[in-house]
Amino acid sequence: MVKYVNYKNEKYPISISFHALEKLEEEGLDLGDEKSLKPIKRLFWHALVAGHFHESKELKIKEEDSSFILDWCFAEFQEIMPLFLGMLTGKNGKERKKQVIKN
C-alpha cells in the first residue's frame, strides 16, 4: 500500500512496509520508544524510500532534509501510520490508532 504526504504542493509517496520496518529494526530503533523522536524520523525516511520504489519514482529528497518535510506533514504522517501498522498486524486502522494514541 502506498499513501501520500504533501509538502510544498507536491505529493510524496510513502509506504510503511516490511522494508521500512526491517530497516528500523536493523538500526536498533523501536517505535515504542516514547523518549525519542528518532524512530519516527527514521521510519519516515524509510517509508519515503519504499514509497518511491513502489511507485517507480525517483527520490529527489536528501536523507538529511527528510526531517524538514516531516516538520510540514507530521500530523498527516501520524494519521497514515496506523493504516499501515494495522495492515501489518492484522488490526484495522481504527483499533491500531486507539492503541497508538493510548501509548
Image (cartoon, helix red, strand yellow):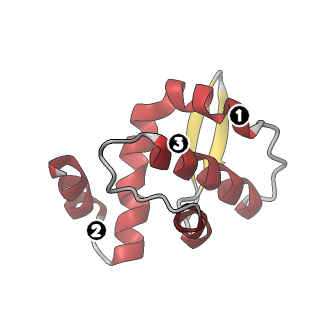
Q: Quadrant of the N terminus?
A: bottom right
**Residue of label 2:** 92
Query: Spatial distance from mark 2 to mark 3, Cα to Cα?
Result: 24 Å
Measured from the top left, where is residue 95 in percent x and y? 20, 63
Callout 3, which amino acid? Lys
Residue at 58% from the left image edge and 61% from the top image edge: 27
Image quadrant where residue 99 sits: bottom left
Which residue is nearer to you in this view: 92 or 75? 75
**Residue of label 3:** 41
Which residue is nearer to you in this view: 99 or 31? 31
Query: Spatial distance from mark 1 to mark 2, Cα to Cα?
Result: 33 Å
Q: Tag 2 or tag 1, which sits nearer the N-term?
A: 1
Q: Which mark is residue 64?
A: 1
The residue carrying pointer 3 sits among few (fewer than 14), some (14 to 19) or many (20 or more) residues within 10 Å by Cα, namely some
| Residue that protrudes farthest toward the bottom in the picture | 90
Q: Is residue 72 above or below residue 44?
A: above
Residue at 62% from the left image edge and 47% from the top image edge: 45
| Residue that protrudes farthest toward the top in the picture | 8
